[in-house]
Image: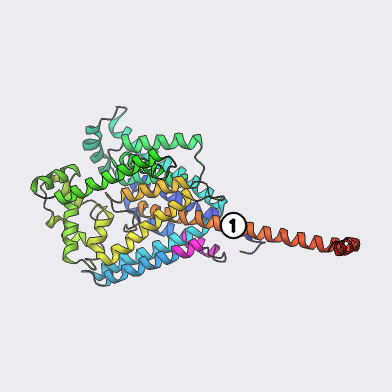
Amino acid sequence: MSAPGYSRSLMLSQAIMLLAPAMLGVFWPLYAFNRDLAIPLLRPVLLTSSLLLALLWSGKPATRAERQLGAMMAVLVAAMLVPSLLATDPARALREWLKLGLMAAYCISFARALRHRGAARLYGIGLAVAACIIGALLMATYVAHMGMTFPTYEAVRYHYKAVAINSGVMVNPAAFSCIFCFLCALCILRASKLLRIIGTGLLIVCSVFTGTRMPPLATAASVFLIVLIAGLRSRRLPLRVVAWMFVFCACATLVIGVFSAGGEAVFRTMSKASEGRWDVWSVAFAKFTERPLFGYGYVSWRDDLVSRLPGEYKMTREIAEMIAGGYHNEFMTALAEQGIFGTAAVLALFWFVLRCGWKLAFEKRTAWKCGGWALFAGIFLILRANVEVPGLFGYAQEPADFLAYAFLAVLVAGLSAEEDHLRQAAAASSRATGRLQRIRAVTSFVHPRAISQSALND
């Protein structure tokens, strides 16, 4: 960007950037009103805004973090091409692969635009407002169907949830969009008292008035893991010992559970505890063993998931027919649809997310001071990936997918902003050194006695 037009370009960039949180905020109310209108609008609006941002920020030099993101996206897209070409339905798989490429471009363009602190702050405010809009929709939906009654678990979980979905409000994905919008905002904005109050209220709404267990469980597990990481990094020996003892016990329990997981009784228990998801995961693993290298291709779960289900619970078939699709686990979905070849790229992407969040949280930063929330949101996203599909490996058809890639853009923008700050500081220091040297030269020229005295001293 040239200096005279920089301010105008920045203002235009900020205006375009507000399109993304605005669309994320109005999507679920619009979906409840007219599903056929909401879905076709989502992807074009978000992708068009990212394209315009890419054009506006094309002249800015790429940072090391952006080059790493570009390489990661290139590896992911290239790795998914081979399983798509070898899929049972290549045409369908290639359509989904094209969506993945568009999501990668969306992520990179947003990461470049968010490097500017003012633009990022505006985007964070937009995400917080979007979360409040979704939260208000969820609360209004509960009041409309349940009245001003206190919610009980049975009533909300087994009665209200079905009624809300029939009315057009998909409470599970909407609750995730609400919580994760706000978490992404906290990765940019300082957690003031007002934001803490709003966040607590949104968490209560999504946990108590929706019938979904993901928000409270994922939040509690993320908090616990953050505390455990703090214990492992603590300078106090007793805290480190307790933390490592817990890690050892958890690993031992996991190993024992894996080796003892067998038999009809265990299968039925796990299926009931997971409300049928265990049955779906068993189908994904069985399909992975049949085609372990490249899998069956994108959206192949639609071909035979219901016919393969081994369970006898009604909830199992309801889960299989949900539009969210997949195997309700991003990692199992990757194994069944992309095999080891594609799953390796997916795991690398999740590792990149954790690595960026870890750097922002524990390395000293001057330009970006919300790193703790970045690590928390990354852990939250990965935990959620164990029970749902939309996200970093989703099918690019709902806000959860775009939010996940936007979060990755926020992480990279935080690292890039620090690189820009250090580069500017080095340039300012160099200019100051140059001015000091010129002043000394002029002073020496104007006062030759100083030079003579210096020569005598030598």
Horizontal relation, residue 444 to residue 272: left or right: right
- Residue 255 position within the rendered picture, expressed as x and y whole percent measured from the top left: 21, 50
Q: Is residue 68 magenta?
A: yes
- Residue 337 position within the rendered picture, expressed as x and y whole percent measured from the top left: 24, 63
The relative height of residue 324 versus residue 138 in the rendered view (above or below) is below
Question: From which residue to which does the magenta span run?
Answer: 49-69
Please report the residue visible at 32 percent of the width from the left and 66 percent of the height from the top: 97
Kind of residue at disc 1: Leu
Quadrant position of the N terminus in the picture? bottom right
Q: Toward the viewer: 277 or 93?
A: 277
| Residue 216 in view (yes/no) | yes
Total labels drawn:
1
Secondary structure beneath dot 1 equals helix
Q: Which residue is mark 1?
A: 422
- Residue 271 position within the rendered picture, expressed as x and y whole percent measured from the top left: 16, 46
Horizontal relation, residue 372 to residue 425: left or right: left
Please report the residue visible at 23 percent of the width from the left and 48 percent of the height from the top: 254
Q: Main secondary structure of the magenta part?
A: helix
In the displayed orientation, state which residue is furthest to the left: 264
Quadrant position of the C terminus in the picture? bottom right
- Residue 361 position within the rendered picture, expressed as x and y whole percent measured from the top left: 46, 48
Horizontal relation, residue 192 to residue 34: left or right: right
Q: Toward the viewer: 419 or 149?
A: 419
Please report the residue visible at 40 percent of the width from the left and 68 percent of the height from the top: 74
